[in-house]
Image (cartoon, helix red, strand yellow):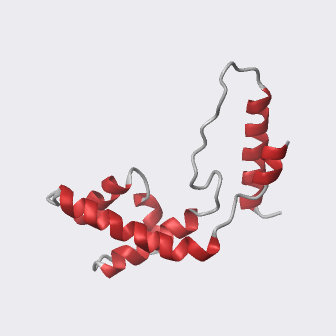
């Protein structure tokens, strides 16, 4: 079993323990990216491609240190503080297009998700 798969199995077991606890709540909200769908590598790759298209070259191993916060915060981090809200919005749409084009044909749930919800 790969390290990544072991980590996912641990996460699933932790969530299952959590769900067995007694709560009055009627619903649970899950984050989508990396929790329900296996898409994190595609987000990272789309950022790297998007940035390259805008003249910003960053190696994948260095990108990890910058990959935090909202999309708008990341745009400001890479494009500078003097960028207008309109430009941030426009760049955000372009980055999202890059992600959707990369991920569109690779949609896949996190391993064990269907089993988790059925049990």
- Residue found at x 64% / y 58%: 37
**93 with respect to 59 (left or right):** left
| In the foreground, 80 or 115 | 115
- Residue found at x 26% / y 58%: 76
Q: Is residue 6 visible?
A: yes
Give the image location of residue 103, x and y in percent. 56, 72
Quadrant, the N terminus? bottom right
Give the image location of residue 110, x and y in percent. 70, 58
Instruction: State which quadrant residue 111 falls in.
Output: bottom right
Quadrant, the C terminus? top right
**113 with respect to 102 (left or right):** right
| In the foreground, 66 or 99 | 99
Give the image location of residue 82, x and y in percent. 14, 59
- Residue found at x 83% / y 45%: 118
**11 with respect to 63 (left or right):** right
Q: Is residue 80 visible?
A: no
Instruction: State which quadrant residue 106 falls in.
Output: bottom right
Above-or-below relation of 69 to 19: below
Give the image location of residue 24, x and y in percent. 68, 18
Above-or-below relation of 97 to 65: below
**65 with respect to 30 (left or right):** left
| In the foreground, 49 or 32 | 32
């Amino acid at each position: 079993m790969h390290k990544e798969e072991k980590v996912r199995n641990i996460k699933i077991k932790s969530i299952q323990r959590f769900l067995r606890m007694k709560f009055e709540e009627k619903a649970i909200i899950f984050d989508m990216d990396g929790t329900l769908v296996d898409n994190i590598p595609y987000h990272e790759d789309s950022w790297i491609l998007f940035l390259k298209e805008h003249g910003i070259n960053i190696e994948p191993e260095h990108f990890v240190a910058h990959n935090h916060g909202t999309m708008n915060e990341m745009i400001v981090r890479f494009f500078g503080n003097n960028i207008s809200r309109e430009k941030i919005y426009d760049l955000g749409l372009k980055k999202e297009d890059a992600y959707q084009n990369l991920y569109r044909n690779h949609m896949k749930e996190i391993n064990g998700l269907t089993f988790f919800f059925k049990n």
